[in-house]
Image (spheres, rainbow, N blue to C red):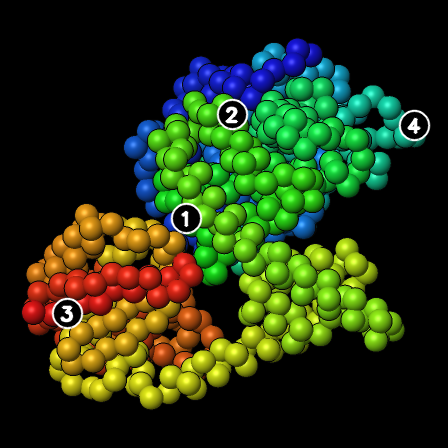
Amino acid sequence: MKKITSKELRKKWLDFYKSKGHEDIGSVSLIGDGETGVMFNVAGMQSLMPYLLGKKEHEKGKRLCNVQGCVRTVDIDNVGDETHLTFFEMMGNWSIGDYFKKEKTKWSFELLTKEFGLDPDKICATVFAGNEKVPRDDETAKLLEEVGVKKENIFFLNDNWWNLEGTVGTPCGPDNEWFYPKHDNKCCDTCDINCPCDRYVEIGNDVYMQFEQLGNGEYRELKQKNVDTGFGFERNLAILSGTTDCYMTDLFEKAISEIESFCGIKYGQDEETTKAMRIVCDHIRTSVMLIGDVKGILPSNVGAGYILRRLLRRAIRYIRKLGGNVELIEKIALSYIDDVYAEAYPLLGEKRDYIISEIKKEVTKFEKTLEQGMKEFEKLISNLKTFAPDVKTIAGQKAFRLFDTFGFPIELTIELAKENGYDVDVEGFNKAFENHQEQSRTASAGVFKGGLAERNETTAHLHTATHLLLASLKKILSDDIHQCGSNITPERLRFDFNFERKVLPEELKKIEDEVNKNINSAIEVVCEEMTLEDARKSGATGIFDNKYGEKVTVYTIGDVSKEICGGPHAKNTKDLGKFKIVKEESCGAGLRRIKAILE
C-alpha cells in the first residue's frame, strides 16, 4: 500500500466518482443553515436532505459527490487522543433515485482496493441483521461476496440501520459499513470487528434509503431509493499514511513542526505534551475554518460564537503550557491557510489577514484576563487545601465569580479543577448565573416589554424597525448576530448586538438600504399567539425560556423577520417612513450599538 498525501486523497475520491458519472457539488458552509436545527454542519448529507427526501431536484443531477467540512464539538473534551477532532471532513457521494446497492457495493470495493490500495483480504463489512419488520439484508451480503469481500469477513449486525430520528414519513434503511485493521497483530484467535481490542476501524458507510417509516415499527418500500455514502477523510488518510494517529498525517505536519521548533519539544515525547500539541493543532484549525467560512463567525459569548471562543481560549491555554505565544498561534494558523487548505478552501486565502487579525484580537483579549484569573483560581485552590482539606468541590458561586469577574468560561474552570483533583458545582454555577440574569432584568424594569420607554404610534413604528434592522444585520454582516439589548423612545431607537469590530461606513449604508427596501415593499406585519414550542417549530427567533410564559406573541414580516416579541408594532412596513442610522459605536466587549431614527 503506497502512502498518499491529503491532496492526493481528496483528488482520488473526487476523480473516482466523477469517472462514475457524479458531479462535484463542492463544500457548503460549516455553519448551520437554520433549517436543520443544528449549530454546525455535522455530516456531508445534511444540506442534501431536501433532495434525498424528494422535495427538490438537484441542479447537478442524480449522481453527486464532494468532500464536505464538518464541525462536531459534543466530545470536545476527548480531543487530545489519536482520533478525536472538532473539524473534520467527510468524503461523500450520493445517488438520488438513480443507482442502488449493486453499483455502490462494486464501486466502494473498487475504490478501496484499486485506488486506495487496501488489501482485499483484510477488508471487512457489516450489514443489517434484520428484525421482525424488515428482513436481513442478504442482498448486500451477496453483492459483497461477488465483488471480492471474503465471506468470513462479512458480519450481520442489528446496528446496521439508519433512520432520521424515527420520524414518520421519512426515509430509512440498512447500511453497509466498511472496516479495516489498524495492524496485523491479533489479540486472540477470533480477533475480528466485534473484538473489544478495537483493532478494526470503520473507514466508511454506505446507507441505503430503501424504506419509508410509517410509525409503529412499520415500513414500506420507497419509490425513490437513495444511496448516501460517507467516508471519514482524516481516518482514511491516517490508514493510508501507515498510522493510527490522525495527527501524524500531512494535515498537521507543519503545525506540529512549528510547535516543536518554537517550544523546543518533540511530538510523542510524553503523553501530556503530545495531548497538548494535539489540542492546539485541532482547535486552531477549527477556529481558522469557522472564521474563514463563507458565513464566517467571530468569537462571542453566545451560540456558535461561544463555541469558537471556547476553542480558541482552550488552545491559548495549552499553547502557554507548551511555552508558546501569539506568534506561534499565528504560525500554526498560517500553516493551514497557506499550505494544507490553499487549494481545497481558497476562501481562507482571500480572508487570510482577516482571520489572523481576529485570532490575534481574541488572544490579546484572553491573555489580559487569563493571567489574573489563573492567579485567582490558584488562590481559590490554595485556600481550599489550607482551610477546607476535606472539600473536593468548588462552589458554584466561586465558579460564577471566576466567570463574571475574570472572564473564565465554566468549561475552563471545570478543566482546571479536574487537573487539581476537584469537581465543580455546575448546578450552583447555573443558579448563580440565572440569579444574575434576573437581577439584570429587575434593574431595567423601568422600561416596558421590548425596550419601549413608553407606548404610542411612533414607538410602535420604531419597534417594528428594530426587527427589520436585526434582519438586515444578519444578512449584511453575519447570521450569528442577535439582539443584546434595545431601548426605544419617541425620538429614536437604540439597538445593541454582538459583533467584534466597528461596522464600516459602507456596511452601514448597505444595512440602512436593506431596511428601507423592506419598508418600501409594504409588507404586512402579522401577529400570532402560540405556544413556545409551536413558535420554535415555526422558525421564530427569540430566547426560548420560560420568561415569556406558556403563550407567546410572534410577529412575522413576510420572509424578512419572524420574532417572539412583546409588541406593539405597526400593521404594515409602509407606515414606518424612512429609516436612517445616526450613530454606530461600541457598548462593551464584543458588543456594538446602533442608534437610528425614522424620518
Secondary structure of the residue carrying numbered label 1 = loop
Q: Nearer the viewer, mark 3 or mark 1?
A: 3
Residue matched to label 1: 297
Identify whether 452 is placed above or below 372: below
Q: Secondary structure at mark 3?
A: strand
Q: What residue type is disc 3 on?
A: Ile
Mark 3 or 2: in front is: 3
Q: Earlier in the sequence, mark 3 or mark 1?
A: 1
Which residue is labeled 2 in the image?
340
Q: Residues within 10 Å of mark 1 (few under 14, many from 20)?
A: many
Marks 3 and 2 close (CB-CB < 8 Å): no
Q: Which residue is mark 4?
A: 189
Give the Cα distance between marks 4 and 1.
Answer: 52 Å
Could you say which is closer to the camera, residue 63 or residue 259? 259
Image quadrant in which the N terminus is located: top right
Q: 307 or 130: nearer the eye? A: 307
Amino acid type of the residue tagged 2 in the rendering: Val
In space, the residues marked 3 and 4 are separated at their CA atoms by: 78 Å
Residue name at image x 49 percent, y 82 percent = 438
Residue 258 position (above or below residue 329): above
Above or below — where is 72 with respect to 10? below
